[in-house]
Structures are given as C-alpha cells and as structure tokens.
Amino acid sequence: HCLLFEDQKCKVVQCSWVSCRSMASKTPVGFIGLGNMGTPMARNLLKHGYPVIATDVFPESCKEFQDSGAQILDCPAEVADKADRIITMLPSSPNVIEVYTGPNGILKKVKKGTLLIDSSTIDPAVSKEMAVAAEKMGAVFMDAPVSGGVGAASLAKLTFMVGGVEEEFNAAQELLTCMGANVVYCGQVGSGQAAKICNNMLLAIGMIGTAETMNLGIRLGLDPKLLAKILNMSSGRCWSSDKYNPVPGVMEGVPSANNYQGGFGTKLMAKDLGFAQNTATSTRTPIPLGSLAHQIYRTMCAHGYSNKDFSSVFQFLREEEVQ
Amino acid sequence: HCLLFEDQKCKVVQCSWVSCRSMASKTPVGFIGLGNMGTPMARNLLKHGYPVIATDVFPESCKEFQDSGAQILDCPAEVADKADRIITMLPSSPNVIEVYTGPNGILKKVKKGTLLIDSSTIDPAVSKEMAVAAEKMGAVFMDAPVSGGVGAASLAKLTFMVGGVEEEFNAAQELLTCMGANVVYCGQVGSGQAAKICNNMLLAIGMIGTAETMNLGIRLGLDPKLLAKILNMSSGRCWSSDKYNPVPGVMEGVPSANNYQGGFGTKLMAKDLGFAQNTATSTRTPIPLGSLAHQIYRTMCAHGYSNKDFSSVFQFLREEEVQ
Amino acid sequence: HCLLFEDQKCKVVQCSWVSCRSMASKTPVGFIGLGNMGTPMARNLLKHGYPVIATDVFPESCKEFQDSGAQILDCPAEVADKADRIITMLPSSPNVIEVYTGPNGILKKVKKGTLLIDSSTIDPAVSKEMAVAAEKMGAVFMDAPVSGGVGAASLAKLTFMVGGVEEEFNAAQELLTCMGANVVYCGQVGSGQAAKICNNMLLAIGMIGTAETMNLGIRLGLDPKLLAKILNMSSGRCWSSDKYNPVPGVMEGVPSANNYQGGFGTKLMAKDLGFAQNTATSTRTPIPLGSLAHQIYRTMCAHGYSNKDFSSVFQFLREEEVQ
Amino acid sequence: HCLLFEDQKCKVVQCSWVSCRSMASKTPVGFIGLGNMGTPMARNLLKHGYPVIATDVFPESCKEFQDSGAQILDCPAEVADKADRIITMLPSSPNVIEVYTGPNGILKKVKKGTLLIDSSTIDPAVSKEMAVAAEKMGAVFMDAPVSGGVGAASLAKLTFMVGGVEEEFNAAQELLTCMGANVVYCGQVGSGQAAKICNNMLLAIGMIGTAETMNLGIRLGLDPKLLAKILNMSSGRCWSSDKYNPVPGVMEGVPSANNYQGGFGTKLMAKDLGFAQNTATSTRTPIPLGSLAHQIYRTMCAHGYSNKDFSSVFQFLREEEVQ
C-alpha cells in the first residue's frame, strides 16, 4: 500500500509538504496509453505529486489529460528521452510491440537504467521479448498487468501482478502503490502476465459454471436467491456466485442487475482466454475446462455478446427452446 | 442449530435430566442404513435422547450399532411398524427403491402420518416417485441429502438440504438438527436433491478449474503457494482454491496433503455428476462445463482414481509427458 | 432387400397377381402412429398387399390413411384384438409407454404369440421394459428404429436396426423389407436402439467437426469447395463432409443448399444425443465429444435452430464477431 | 502424377535413356532433413534421375544416404550454394527457422530465383515468415506438407498440399510428383499448412468420436464388428471407422491390430492439434470439438500414450472402472 497517507493525524500537513517537495524534487514519470484505464491511473500519479510526461495516439485523450496538468509529447521515443521511469497501458500485444520497438518507439531513445513498466494484458511471450530488447539498450522491463476495472483504476484500488528482476521491484512498487491497493511480486519477467492469465481462466470457468448451475437449479424448481445462498454456504461457493452472481435479481450493484452493461466485456475475457490457450499449448498443459470456456466465450462473441459483461453467459445459456 | 446443549454451564446436569426425560417421553426414531455415514448420524440421535430402532443389510453393522444402545430389527417393514419417524441413509437409487417399496420395505407396514426422511443422494425423480408412493399410504416423504463427509457426520456438522411439504419441515428439522449444523428448506419434494446436485456440479467445475489453473501456473514458472494466494485475493477465488487446494504443499489438513486419501471419492463425484447430467438432459438445460467435468471424472475412474479424493484431478492432469 | 419387384420384366403382372393373392391370403398388420414417418411406411405395407389396421390419436391422420384403403380402429387395444403383427412408430418414450401399457394400450388385448415391432427411436431401457411387459402377456416385442427420413420412408429405402429374440427376426424381416432397403439384426432387445444411438452420436460429432473444420479453413483463406475436396480424398473424410456438407455452396441437394430446411432437425438430433448421454451415464462410459456435441445441439435449440437441419451448426459457429 | 513412366510400352528403354540424360542434364535438387520421412522421399528423387545434394544434423543419416548415391554437404548454406531447388523436411517450427534463417542457414547463400519447398508440418505463421525472408533474398518459398506416413513416403504415395505463388506451382509439382500420388494446389503461402491442419483436426475428431461410439456400443452389448458394419453403411461412417478402426479385432493391417504400434503417434497428433488451436485462436474461430480433441490427446501424452498410434484413444477410453 501507499504509505504516504498512513499516519492519519498529520495527513494534511504532511501531504502539503510532500506535495511541495515532490513537485520540486520528484523526477517525472512517463505514461503511454491514455485510454479508459490509463487516464485515471496516470491521474493518480499526478495526485501523488509526480510530474507526468505522456503520449497517446489519440489527440483528444492527450488534450484532456494535458488539462489535468500533464506534459504531452509527440511519441513514445520523446517520452523516453525525458523520463527514466515509464509506464505503458495499451490494449494488445501489437500496440506494445509498436510502442516499444517501433520507429518512434521507446527503445529508440531510452536511457540506460530506465525502468519500463508495462501494465497491458498481453501474451507473456511478448513481455519476455520486450524485456530482452530493453536489456540490450541497458533498460529494465517489468510486466505489471492489473486486475480491477475502470472504477478500481479511479479509486487507486487496482491489484498489480508484477514480473521482472526482483531488485527492481521496490522501484516499481513506489509508483504502482500510487495507483493500486495491492502490488504483488510474482517472479521473473512474464510472471505478472502468467498470474493474471491464470486468475482470469479460473474466473471464466467459475462464471460459466455458476451460470450453468444456477440455470439448472432454476429449471429444477429452485428459487435463485435460495440456491445462491445454499451454494455460498457450501463447497460450490466461488467469486462468481457470491460477489458477482450472473442471475438477474439475485444481487444488486453487479452487471446482471443492469442488463449486463458495464463490467468486464465478453470480448476481453475471450482475449484473455486466448492467451491462456496459447500458453497452455506451448507448455503442453491440458486445460479441458479452460479451453471449453474459451470456445464458449468465443461463440458468444459471434452471437452479439461481445460488449456485454462476461456474466451474460447466464443469458446465453438460459434462453428457452421454442417448442 | 440444536439448542439442547447450548448452555455450557449446566450441560451435564441438564443433559442427564433431558436424557432421562427423553428416554421416558421421546418416541423412537427409525433409522435404516448403518454405513459410514448412517452410523454416526444415528449415534447423534441417540446422544440427543432419541430411542433408535434400526436395520441394515449387513449384520456386522447392526451388531455394532446395537452395542451403542439401539434396538435392531430384521427389515425396513418392521421398523415402519414400530416407528412413526424414519430416516434412511442409503448408497444409491436402487437401494432406496428396495427399502421403501420392496417386499420387506417400509411402505409394506408404514403407519398413517409417518414422517419418512431420506438423506441418501439419489436421482430427484426417484425421490418424487417415493413421495407419491408414500402419499398413497398416508405417509409423508421428504428428501434431505447432506453435504459434509464422515467427519461432519460424527461431529453433527452436516448440512441438510430438505425438500418436501413445507408444513412438515419443522418436524423434520427437530431430528435433523441433532445431526447437522445447517438445515435448509429448499422447496417441494426433490428440491433437496436438486440443491445438492447443483452444489456438487459447481464444486466439480471449480475443482477441475483450480487444478488446471494451478498446473498451468506452475508450468509457467509461478510458485504454487504464491499463485494460490493471488487467486484467493482475486476473482479466481473459489472453495477449491481457498479451502481445499488440490496441489500438494499448498495447504495442510486437506486430502492433497495426504496423497489424496480420505475426503470425497472421485467415484462418488462421478455418481453425482451423473445425476446432474440426467436432470440437465431431462430439462433440456445446456451444461457444457458440468458435462465435461462429468466426462473427466468418469475417465479418471477408469484410470485408477475411483477411491482417491476428487481433488486428485490435479494429479491426473499434471502428469508430465515423457519425451 | 424386398425381392418382390426385382424382376422388372414381369413386374406389373406379378404384382397384380401378388396383390390379389395377398389381399386374399395375407393376414392383416396393425400399425399405430400415422405421423410423417408412419404414414408412408404403412402405405408401403399396403402396396405389398398387406391389409393394414391402424390407429392414431389425430383423427385427420386416420381419415387420410383410411382413404388409402386401411381400416381404422379407435385405440391400440382394438388393433391388438384384430392383428397378430403390429408395428408402432411414435415420437417419444412416453408415447410408446402409453400405446403399449396404457389403459387402452396394446397389452390390454394382445393375443398370445403376437409380434410387436416398435420402430420409434426411444430410450433402450424403455424398449427393454416393453419387452418384459409383452412377454408377460405371451407376446414378443422387438425394437426396430430406422435411419433415413421422410423421403426414404416413402421410397421404402429406410434402414431398420432390429433388436429382439433372434428366432423372430425372420418374421419381422418379412414386414420390414416392405418398408426399407436394409434390415440389420443387432442382437437382443434394445440393440436396435443402441445401434441407432451410436450411429447418430458419431454422426453428430462428425457434423460438428466438419462444420468447425470448414469454418477454420475458410477463415485461414482456403476455398470451401477445394477444402472439401482435400478432406474427402484424405483421412478427414466423413459422411458429413462428402455426402451432406454443411457449407452452403459446396454441394447441391442437401439442406445447406436450401437454407438448412428439410433434413434432420436439430431438435431431433438433440433428443437422440440425450439418449446417448443417458446410456453412457448408466454404463459409466466416457463420451467426451459425444457429450459436448449434445451440449452444442442443446444450446442451438435455445437459439432458434430447433427446426433447422442439424448441419446448420455451421451457421451457428461461423457467425462473425461484430467488432 | 509423375508422367515419366506413363507410356508403358517403352518404359525400360525410355527410362534408361531418360536416366542417362537426366544424370547428364538434370540440375541437382537440394534436400535437407534425412529423417524417417525425408530419406525415402529423397530416394524417390534419386530414382527419378535427379542428382541430390543433401544435409542433416545427424551424421549417420547422411552417411546412409550418401551410400544411396547422394552428395552430402556440411550445412544448409552450402546446399543453397549448389542447388537452385531445395526441399526441406524437418520435425518442427524451430528446426525450420534454424535451417532457413540460422547462421548456416539456406538464406545465407541462397541464389536469386531458387525454389524452396518446405514439406515440414509447422505453424502456418512460420511458413509465411519464411516466405517473406526468402523473398527478400530473391528466392521463392512454398509450403508443401504431406499426408501419409513412412510407408506412403517409400512408395511415393504421399499427398502434398501446396501453398505459395501460383506461377511456381508447376515447378514444384515436377519434383513433388516424384514423391507423391497427389499434389494439390491450395492457395497462397501457408495454405498447404492450413489444409493439413484442417484435415488432421477433423481426423482427430472422427477418431475420438469413433472410439467413444464403438466403446459405448460395446458396453450396450453390440458386437464391435457388427457395429462397425452398421456405422459404415450409415451416416456415422468416417475414415476412422471404415479404414482405420481403433477397436482391436475389427480390422486387419491397422495399428489397432498390432497393439497400436506404428501409424501416426499420439504425440504428433497433439502437435498438429496445437497448430489448429493456435490458428483458431488467432482467427477467433470457435472449434469446440477440435479444442477438446486437443486436450484429450494432450492428456493421453501425459499418461503414457505419446508414442502409440493415435487410434489408441479407444484403449484410453475403454479402460474399465475398478469397483
């Protein structure tokens, strides 16, 4: 956790002082990728007194963030020229490859000793490639994908799963604690991605399992709220049954209570399951349920569920056969 | 909960008194099926002062239980002749059919108004048939399958999921609270079985999912304890990851720490998944993961895992390919 | 094969003669179930000179068939009173149970030695029950489900898979050859159903596999006709790839060329896979692909594909994800 | 087909003459990869009068092939220096990458206009990469994976599925017809791999499906030979049921008749299914059965089936549960 505010009694004073000192003394942090997640993350760095030097391919995103007090540059290479700590938050592997190794990429102007932290969720193999490329330039690359959505990003409640050289973890942690509630060191480069992939694969299995089970129980005449209660006090309990139940009417404040809007899109889950599938294939690991979960979310994407929350698998499965 | 012993200070005195009174005043309870589960359950009835009239097809089981203070009769029909509350705890549907409707079965001599509680885990359709047959004789049948194993049975910590006419639930609860920590009313006859089937299906999915995920993470270089910790603080969390982790070395006091001995056998899980499959088919409910979980446990049964705890699916999946 | 018409030169003469003789000498055959399949089957019996005594729950069906020259009675029991060879062709297990053992059922008035042939596709367990019930009345029950659709029924090109006492096979064959091109003896009662279930399970697997494969190939840039050609000259070949290709434009005269109309409905395939699932569960046989095929057809039924040909799984899988 | 020997009347004379002429006039063909498949393929080139210049990492393989009349060089680069048509037959993607782009690789010394034909079964993405790399050097790369095993390679009965620039197909065909019975043009580079992957995925699905179906039928009391016969005359028919039946005793001359020795190893099938999985994931194509087939072969590899023929899935599934 971020320790800055821990002593509640002197919080305000201390913060003012810290803030002043840090504006004067803190070195700037680079931030590349000002999307739905990146922007609130970068804002939390500003709140903690770090000058932020940022860039993004979309001018509107840059303009908006500039108004928050950040400096905007033209491309990743220029950011690398000005900052020796850079965080990237990008949608997919090709974007990461471009931002790091492209013609205007970070590695074109990166300085020796620069700390590069990539919070994108991508193929662990790409993380490893980037780490090798960074090392050739004398820089250090760490992967630090997050769990938690836009809300958690705004509230600095993300969980970061960090992979990379252990000696650099403290330096990474200093920045990441400004943006998240948990920062977990997972091991060598790629381990952060590995941990995230594992979690999301089990999440997908638990969600589809919960949807199947609730649907079966309802068809057998059980009341959904009662069934959820029984499961949650028994061995069937999982995060999808007790914190994010996919059946409308069972819980409030979750996507199933809001027509599966918001939350974590089916398309994003399918993407993460693709990574799980790839890493399982390359390590010759059997993942029968994970693989079937992938196929189910893939099929849902093709039937109009791409942008609904991934708990909409209940809706996908429960549709009644017309006689 | 059973309130009898709640005031610890006067426990002994009260119990002696209660015991005396109950021996005098409590009407006897019939108990049929003195196996690994039935015997400790029936003992808990004795402990609560209920005279027990029992029978079983195995003379040794009867002899042993007789030494505990119970009266042993020759067959279910005779038990039905003497008791107006009868509990049955049997291994499978055919046994239940025999014990209720066979030539020496309960219904041959059941008295009007008798309460019949079946705690076996069987096909809900059989429960419904038994209820109809009982009703014809003027008796009331309820299904009340349990979750929890031999240990929970001994400690009276079982959970009972009860289906049947709601007006009779209080009468059933009076007896069941002597043997369990939770007694949940689920709805009409068969609902207890339905709830149990649902729970166990989700349990199986969560367990295989956890085993796949832990195995994949280990192959990707993650430490198993660290991975379990990350999952359990994230959305991958489930009962199988946080209370019954299938990877040896991650938790103590679970079957994976003891070569998968004890616990809940793979064969029993395969049996329960067969019920889930049957009820899903008859209600035309898609259960893709539940169905695949069934096939996996079925395959394991054929490869020497029948009597190992169902968390041994980790062992089944992790075996390394010989190059 | 039916040999009656084989000598083309004397066909008309011979048939007139046969027809005359048979009207005079052939004993009547009972036929129960005048649906889409039953009516053309029963007509083929008439064509071969058998007097037919029929019944059905729908008066219109009876009226129509009466116009073809059959005698119509009120209920199965009456048919059993008049005929000592009876064929039944019904939609599902409950109908079969009703027609045989119901209050107006065949067994109420069946004569000793009557041959009962059930061509319905039902649960093999029900076939065995009917056989036992028939035997108690001194009658013989055989199961003889068909492969082939309405067209094959009209053209007498069905395949019959027959289970029952071997000594009665010749008697059954005499009638069945009038309605089908192949009559195969499969073994004891229920074997006909077993063979049909096995065939249809493999058919479903081959069809979904073909659909997945064609779809993958198309997405990889292969021409569908070329891919079909390559598969069909290689080890990927199957009936669904070379006789009933599910991709529109690859073959003519199949449902995929006609918007998946006609053919064998997804709902019927799901029903047969339910039988496969049930028998696999009760014999503890692992059928991972068969079980998943069942779940896929079940899901399709819930998404509007019930009445489309089962090759429409290609359409179900190929839908493009909207970006 | 190879047209050289087509005029049977003058075969001997012509061949002598051709042979003489070709030794004098045919330009040499390079061949890299002298394994179980490569050696008999290269021998068939020699038989057709092509001088062969070869190399392999294993000296024994080279020595043996040298005795057949080939010239052996030290590395792929040297082969590329001497031959302007080169065939490669290697076990996996990394080998192909090494042989083409490694420090002693073909592309180090390849001449402009050289035709490079890769018959390895690899990831189509690697084929495309090699094609791009070759094009930069002014050479032409085609992928031409085979179906058929060691026996077909010896008898020149392989099927080649060829991807690449259409104008070069004739030149490739000239060589490939010496080694195979069918040479099929599939489209742009990578299409040969795509076609092979598609075929093998459907093959795997058909094989597992056949194994499940035969096993279920046997458990239901059907005779395996009879069941195979019924399937093969019905819509369940596929290559695995009618040409390569996995049940011992049903057919002769197939691996199931020889304890699953020889044939196409489970490990190789798992590898090909990995490619199918990868290409499906990258094209977002749902392949539920293909994916589950992959997981099953993966699991079998971990349970001692790696080197058994892939039809041994019958053995894997049929093992009886010990009660």
Image: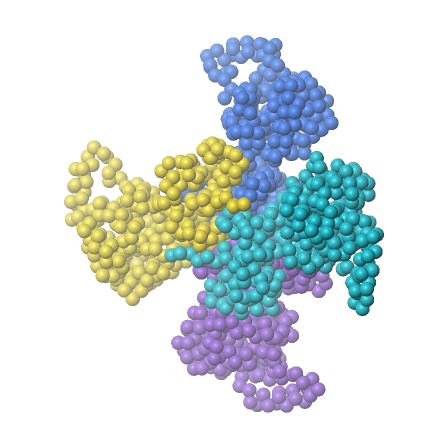
Chain colours: A cyan, B purple, C yellow, D blue
Q: Residue at x 63, y 61 (%)?
A: B238
Where residue B233 sits: x, y (%)?
69, 60
**Quick check: can you spot residue B283?**
yes
Q: Is residue B62 visible?
A: no
- Asked which quadrant contains residue C203, the reply is top left
Location of residue D113 with respect to B60 vertically, above or below: above
Closer to the camera, B119 or B206? B206
Tell me which residue sits at (49%, 49%) in the image. Answer: A303
Residue under the point 53% across and 68% down: A225
Residue C254 x %, y %? 37, 40
Is residue C116 rendered to the left or right of residue B51? left
Q: How many marks?
A: 0
Foreground pick, C222 / C94: C222
- Relative to C320, say whether C28 is above or below: below
Q: Does residue C25 appear to the left or right of A57 in the view shown?
A: left
Q: Is residue C201 left or right of residue B9?
A: left
Q: Quadrant of the N terminus of chain A?
A: bottom right
Location of residue C39 with respect to A226 vertically, above or below: above
Q: Quadrant of residue B262?
A: bottom right
Percent across and percent down for residue C104 are: 27, 64
Q: Residue at x 24, y 40 (%)?
A: C4
State the residue lying farthest toward the front. Answer: A67
Image quarter in which the C terminus of chain A is found: bottom left
Q: Position of residue C246 (x, y in %)?
A: 43, 41
